[in-house]
Amino acid sequence: MNAVLGTIDYGASSVISAIHPPVIKTMKAKTNNGTLAAGLVVAEDSAGDIVAYNPGGTAPLNEAVGVLVQDCDTTTDDGALVLRHGTVVLGKLKVGTSAPDADDLAALEALGIFAVAGK
């Protein structure tokens, strides 16, 4: 695992909103799956690896589990930092390459992840 152990400066992340402390978990990313961008809504595949959430796909890919807080290059890093609870900046969220719709935001809210405008 190429994860770096240490502290995270939440002010440096453009995805996390500072109005509520986040709960972040390091989760295993699917290897050789390209670069997953910060702000991407993610799901776990059938092996339990983090991949892009696909709301129109089949289970389990259509079940959001969180939001990436920093880019993850899956060719070199197998650990992804995933916000599992807290607030995120709405303008930084992505479902694939698009902005989330109301259903995507509802799926995140069901997890205790709330999108807010601004920082």
Image (tube, grey):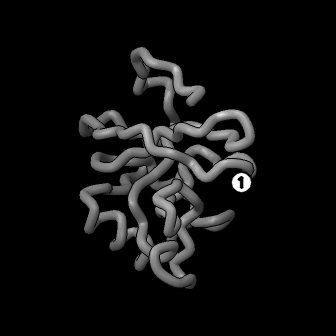
Q: Is residue 94 above or below residue 46?
A: above
Tell me if residue 101 can be seen.
Answer: no
The residue sitting at 42% across, 76% down in the picture is 102
Counting from the top left corner in percent of width and height, residue 94 is at 57, 59
Give the residue type at disc 1: Asn
**Residue sitting nearer the eye, 115 or 43:** 43
Counting from the top left corner in percent of width and height, residue 29 is at 56, 48
Q: Is residue 35 left or right of residue 109?
A: right
Q: Is residue 90 left or right of residue 78?
A: left
**Residue sitting nearer the eye, 27 or 24:** 27
In the picture, which quadrant includes the C terminus?
Answer: top left
**Residue sitting nearer the eye, 3 or 36:** 3
The residue sitting at 42% across, 66% down in the picture is 64
Counting from the top left corner in percent of width and height, residue 105 is at 39, 68
Q: Is residue 83 left or right of residue 39?
A: left
Q: Badge 1: few (under 14), some or many (20 or more) residues near its Cα, within 10 Å?
A: some
In the picture, which quadrant includes the N terminus?
Answer: top right
The residue sitting at 33% across, 49% down in the picture is 84
Tell me if residue 87 can be seen.
Answer: yes
Secondary structure under the numbered disc 1 in the rendered image: loop
Write down the quadrant of residue 65 in the picture.
bottom left
Counting from the top left corner in percent of width and height, residue 13 is at 50, 31
Q: Is residue 109 left or right of residue 119?
A: left
Q: Which residue is mark 1?
A: 33
Q: Is residue 52 above or below residue 106?
A: above
Q: Is residue 103 above or below residue 78?
A: below
